[in-house]
Amino acid sequence: MSGFVVWFTGLSGAGKSTLAAMLSAELRARSVHVEVLDGDEVRTNLSKGLGFSKEDRDTNIRRIGYVAKLIARSGACAMTAAISPYKAIRDEQRAQIPHFVEVFCSCEIPVLAERDAKGLYKKALAGEIKNFTGIDDPYEAPESPEVVVDTGKETKEESLAKILAKLEELGYVPRRGAAVAVSGAAAAGAAAGGARGLIAPHGGELVNRWVEGAAKASLAERAKGLPVIELDERTESDVEMIAIGAFSPLRGFMNSKDYLRVVREMRLESGLPWSMPITLAVSEQAAEGLRVGSEAALRARDGRIVAVIELSDKWRPNKELEAQEVFRTTETKHPGVAYLMSTGPVYLGGEIRVLERPVDSAFPAYDRSPATTRAYFAEKGWRRIVGFQTRNPIHRAHEFITKTALEICDGLMIHPLVGATKSDDIPADVRMRCYEELIAKYYVKDRVLLSIYPAAMRYAGPREAIFHALARKNYGCSHFIVGRDHAGVGSYYGTYDAQEIFNAFSPGELGITTLNFENAFYSTVVGAMATAKTAPGDASTQVNLSGTKVRELLQRGELPPPEFSRPEVARILIESMRSSS
């Protein structure tokens, strides 16, 4: 769930606190977590000691805005009920809070004076009270609030209905009787939040680092005069994944504090679980002219400037430590270690702002951002979605575990990785044809979404399993399949290490449920796909070919047994091998 802020503003007595209380009760009844920041309570606690000068009023509102932003970031709804008389300071809060809904409680002074039990308005009008907002202190009404309620003419129920209608329209709250609604950001096609009823993005907010409109043109022009950092295939994909929010809560490349804690403890400096370092390595020469606090342009391999990084850190990592902790080896035979050791000795950290995609998608029909998949799931009414990561064709064993998982979920997202992989992995275009054929003939199409995952493969086994799960959480998945040797390579990891590593975190910390599967095979005893848990018999009753054996059959143009692979998939692979030989 993505958080949001409802900012009530209006003169004293206009009904801000009353409507906030009514709205909070209604939202809680719809299973929305709500925290109310009432102006009087804030003055008594958070802003105790502040007066009513413009400077003190602004400080009070900034404090309210800061707390509201933190509440929304955690995935909850924050309601503020304070006069907040100055437009500039309200607009300042709007600019800092992604999902900001301003509600103007309008009411004429005579009506306010009439309903004022304390008689403060009458005293202010008589000059007995000075600096009273709306009388001798200014109140600047909002120019374009999301909602205007006239509490002098409307009943409380009518005003509440208008606010609820806007929140429902934006997709921030579920409609009465509806299972789920699309988030305002997703409904607008923006990568700024989740859909109501879906799992919250990791960290509570779906990051969006794209720069648009006039800001994009201005940044692109400024980037022309900045020092340039060259991206490689890995960092190109990282830039895109950060930009679309797939790596939420990351807003750029890690600083040294986040990096070191991730390497040692699988947590960001904030304590949030995160298992893989996302870093930008450069050469000594490139690092020499860069200083913390400056900007640099990120250039793609085709020569385009695609992003700008605001440098917040520069350091020399211990790569041997990183390799051992992340990959469990320092051997350069391991592809992840080989890449790590091939990169520059200096790491740069900082938030990025992205101008363009580093690489055009090879599969535009299946290229969906986290905001887009979340909107799709919401429109389908799915709340329990299981994600399946793969870098291989789907054979019968994969088909079995995905369909088993689908039995307890509303929908399945087949999410093949199409970024950089090993040279001997099956090309992405061949795999995509296999997925299309399989889904068309052997899955209930209304229950499956095929969408690409444009990240690079890191081959970090157990750690990458957590990383893959958290990324799928950002895409809206509530469940994630972890099979045998997930993201493994060679014999560096145990068969089920990728399942066991999740025990390093307490229940609920990751926010996504893993579905662990043992090795699946065709059992000649039960005449169906099964695992050792569900089918009796020894190894002789299990049709379970090795990858090497399958490749040998395909290279000879022979179809593997139908119990192992669907013939349609096998024929695509045979055709691919023939055309590439």
Image (spheres, rainbow, N blue to C red):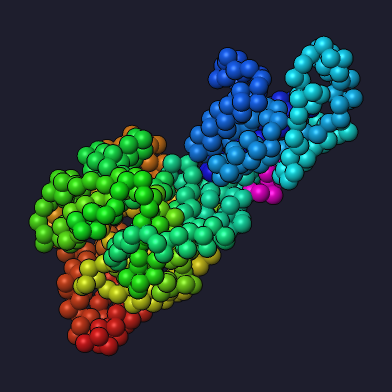
Give the quarter of the figure containing the C terminus: bottom left
Q: Is residue 30 left or right of residue 224?
A: right
Using the image, determine if residue 391 lies above or below residue 387.
below
Closer to the camera in the image, 285 or 115: 285
Where is residue 296? Give x, y as percent.
36, 56
Using the image, determine if residue 218 lies above or below residue 364.
above
Tell me if residue 407 can be seen.
Answer: no
- Magenta stretch encompasses residue 170: yes
Q: How many marks?
A: 0
Name which residue lies at 81% across and 30% down: 156
Q: Is residue 252 left or right of residue 325?
A: right
Q: Is residue 122 left or right of residue 137?
A: right
Where is residue 383? Give x, y as percent.
53, 49
Name which residue lies at 38% across and 53% down: 295
Using the image, determine if residue 331 lies above or below residue 425.
above
Where is residue 577? Give x, y as percent.
25, 83
Magenta region, main secondary structure = helix
- Magenta stretch encompasses residue 262: no
Where is residue 174? Give x, y as percent.
64, 44
**Quadrant in the picture for residue 115:** top right
Stretch in magenta = 163-171
Closer to the camera in the image, 188 or 197: 188
Name which residue lies at 11% across and 52% down: 330
Closer to the camera in the image, 101 or 165: 101
Name which residue lies at 75% across and 19% down: 131
Tell me if residue 580 can be seen.
Answer: yes
